[in-house]
Amino acid sequence: MNIQPLHSWITNSPAERLIIAGPCGAESEEQVLKTAQALSHIESIRLFRAGIWKPRTRPNSFEGVGEEGLIWLKKVQQQFGLKTTVEVANAQHTELALKHGVDVLWIGARTTGNPFSVQEIADVVKGVDIPVFIKNPIHADLQLWLGAIERLSNSGITKLAAIHRGFHYSGKTKYRNKPLWEIAIELKTLLPELPIICDPSHISGNRELIPQVAQKALDLGMNGLMIESHINPAVALSDAQQQLTPLALKELLGNLVYRQTTSQNPECSDKLSQFRSMIDEVDDELMNVLKKRMAIIEQIGQYKKEQDLTIFQLERWQEILRSRLQWAEKLGIPRGYAEKICQLLHEESIRIQTEMMNKK
């Protein structure tokens, strides 16, 4: 997959994070221009965002101003020198955005989850030199995310980036969309050359949580942030609670710590190498312990087969979970971490014993 680095077309250096800001939705020409004017004074902002078409879960709510908003964005480019980006959900949106000279397109979470819509957009931009950002799908499906990225890449788009905006989660969480950072990390592992931008606004759903989410994203090495900013969030027609004033955004960006991926300090590199060697030794021991555990599980599976016993035995599983969590607590290991490990070990135990049962 041919993907150009951000610094080759929008940022000044590989170390610079891409900052995208602007209102959730373009509501009026005055609102757009006043917000853009204020944001234009924040040097780190490279892209002005505004929703022109707003895909809403239910009708009769603000669904965007449509093509008229693209005219306002053209004025943003002309008056303040800011590049612009908008969400497109279908071929018609894409054609209109291109017609009005939008600088960057982004595909929203709902659209990413629909391969037909993504392909429509990919067909329109085929042969067009325009950057496209792809937000993760609403649900935690890495394959859908990858598929959307691949469709745009197959159309010849080389200025690509992913936007991590969190995932719908039915359990209890303080976030609007649970970050599930591990999915973004897995995407980066599969596509190391792909820039990933974090959207703390949609993860948080609450402006109070945005700073900590933004900092976590930067600490994980993400390539930038997309943060919603409105000249007067109190009267915003959509997502008012997660938008910052330009002044608050400037303060937030100034308080963030921008860490580097590598150090030029030889002493730092040597120390990290020592720590990593220690981790390698521990992991080698861990792999050997896991191998020994698997061998015992195979013996258990064979014995259960000979004795016509079921694989899953609730009382034993409950005892394992109870005792291991107690051991973890005594050692100062977080309960959630220990519980995840126990779940993984148990799932693998079930898999191994199932294979033993199915052997002729």
Image: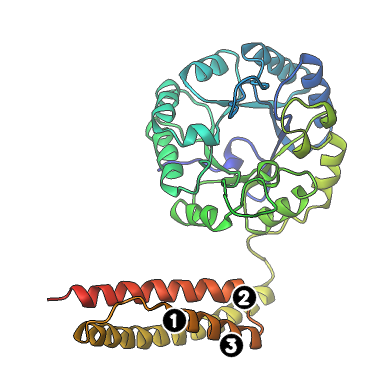
In the depicted view, which residue is nearer to us: 63 or 105? 63
Residue 296 occupies which quadrant of the picture?
bottom left
Residue 127 occupies which quadrant of the picture?
top left
| Image position of 332 with respect to 217: above or below | below
Give coordinates of residue 268: x percent, y percent.
Answer: 68, 74
Are discs 2 and 1 less than 8 Å apart at CB?
A: no
Judged from the image, the secondary structure of the residue bearing numbered disc 3 is helix
State the residue position of label 2: 335
| Image position of 214 with respect to 307: above or below | above
| Image position of 21 with respect to 206: above or below | above
Q: Give residue 315's mark.
A: 1
The amino acid marked with disc number 3 is Trp
Question: Is 291 displayed left or right of 76 in the figure?
Answer: left
Give coordinates of residue 199: x percent, y percent.
Answer: 65, 43
Are discs 1 and 3 less than 8 Å apart at CB?
A: no
State the residue position of label 3: 327
Q: Residue placed at 49% from the left, 49% from the top?
A: 140
In which quadrant will I find the C terminus? bottom left
Give coordinates of residue 336: x percent, y percent.
Answer: 60, 71
> Which-is-in-front pick, marks 2 and 1?
1
